[in-house]
């Protein structure tokens, strides 16, 4: 059952009203892709590499994915936290990677698992956290029409209580972005990206709006192609000759497969160079390196005809 608000004596009347709502009203608001920018009228929030979730705390604890699927059985430890009073929160479930970042691969080990004995084991192997970044309903009142900075102040108040009672939750981090060098600093820390939010923006459930903008930090490397994989079953708008390119750095360290980002023209040019056994250096965009040195989210950018050797990651 709900805990009665520590402030509101009309809880029963509001409870009858709120039961007429459905969680579909609170599908997550989405951000529009953007290039990095700076404006003092915007807040810059850390982008977490995890699973977006709506926490409906109006009648018990019900956690929903972006598509409205219940996550209670997959993450039961989040259903027994000591939530102080009724609210609807928006946040991101993630697995800490031990280096201040998040491991999506570890989180995926838990996603879709609902067998209690399996879930119990995975809780120990892949512990999770939640970063909350918005509050949509406060003490049984819909506040999505309030501005972001008003909702943020209420979220911080709520999290002040929730965080004291539970060590698995946190408030999303607001980054002090004031110049381009700040982006570069965060990129070097391994932060996935940022979500910029206009401070006067309202929350529009289930819609993508330009008042929220997201951008990822990407890095590039020039790597040597040392082979390719055969075609798989992936659909393509043009006839492909290979599936993905195998790449290595200057020291000969294998850095993984690059299979996206090609146009028909660049794909065919790479194929001709491969078949002629010519040196093929390509520029690859990627988000970060895994602990084993493989590229995470690699994407082909260009053929480097001007390069005769790959980059050395030891010097980066």
Image (tube, grey):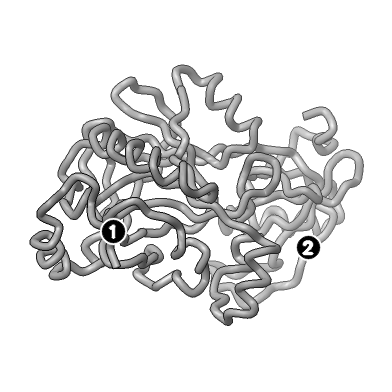
Q: Secondary structure at mark 2?
A: strand
Q: Residue at x 31, y 61 (%)?
A: 56
Q: In the rendered view of the protein, which quadrant contains the N terminus?
A: bottom left
Rendered location of residue 196, percent (x, y): 38, 35
Q: Which disc is residue 58 wearing?
A: none
Rendered location of residue 270, percent (x, y): 71, 54
Earlier along the polypeptide chain: callout 2 or callout 1?
1
Q: Residue at x 13, y 70 (%)?
A: 20
Rendered location of residue 314, percent (x, y): 84, 33
Q: Is residue 52 left or right of residue 84?
A: right
Separation (CA) of disc 2 from disc 1: 59 Å
Rendered location of residue 178, percent (x, y): 44, 18
Q: Nearer the viewer, residue 20 or 37?
A: 20
Q: Which disc is residue 3 wearing?
A: 1
Q: Residue at x 64, y 77 (%)?
A: 118
Residue furthest to the right in view is 251
Residue 299 seen in render: no
Q: Which disc is residue 228 wearing?
A: 2
Q: Nearer the viewer, residue 111 or 74?
A: 74
Q: Nearer the viewer, residue 215 or 51?
A: 51
Q: Name the quadrant containing residue 2.
A: bottom left
Q: Is residue 315 left or right of residue 123?
A: right
Q: Nearer the viewer, residue 184 or 50?
A: 50
Q: In the rendered view of the protein, which quadrant contains the C terminus?
A: top right
């Amino acid at each position: 059952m709900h805990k009665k608000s520590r402030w509101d004596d009309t809880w029963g009347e509001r409870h009858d009203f709120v039961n007429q709502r459905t969680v579909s009203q609170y599908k997550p608001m989405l951000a529009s892709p953007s290039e990095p920018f700076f404006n003092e009228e915007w807040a810059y929030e850390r982008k977490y590499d995890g699973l977006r979730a709506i926490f409906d705390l109006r009648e018990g604890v019900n956690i929903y994915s972006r598509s409205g699927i219940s996550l209670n059985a997959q993450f039961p430890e989040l259903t027994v936290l000591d939530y102080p009073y009724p609210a609807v929160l928006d946040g991101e479930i993630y697995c800490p990677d031990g280096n201040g970042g998040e491991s999506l691969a570890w989180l995926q080990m838990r996603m879709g698992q609902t067998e209690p004995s399996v879930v119990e084991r995975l809780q120990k192997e892949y512990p999770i956290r939640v970063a909350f970044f918005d509050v949509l309903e406060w003490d049984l009142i819909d506040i999505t029409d309030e501005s972001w900075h008003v909702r943020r102040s209420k979220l911080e108040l709520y999290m002040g209580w929730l965080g004291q009672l539970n060590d698995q939750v946190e408030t999303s981090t607001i980054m002090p972005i004031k110049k381009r060098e700040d982006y570069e600093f965060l990129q070097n820390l391994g932060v996935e990206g940022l979500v910029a939010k206009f401070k006067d923006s309202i929350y529009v459930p289930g819609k993508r709006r330009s008042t929220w903008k997201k951008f990822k930090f990407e890095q590039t490397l020039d790597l040597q192609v040392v082979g390719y994989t055969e075609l798989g079953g992936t659909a393509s708008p043009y006839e492909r000759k290979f599936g993905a390119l195998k790449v290595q750095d200057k020291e000969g360290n294998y850095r993984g497969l690059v299979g996206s980002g090609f146009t028909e023209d660049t794909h065919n040019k790479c194929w001709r160079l491969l078949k002629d056994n010519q040196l093929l250096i390509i520029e690859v965009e990627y988000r970060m390196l895994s602990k084993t040195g493989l590229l995470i989210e690699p994407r082909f950018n260009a053929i480097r005809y001007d390069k005769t050797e790959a980059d050395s990651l030891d010097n980066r």
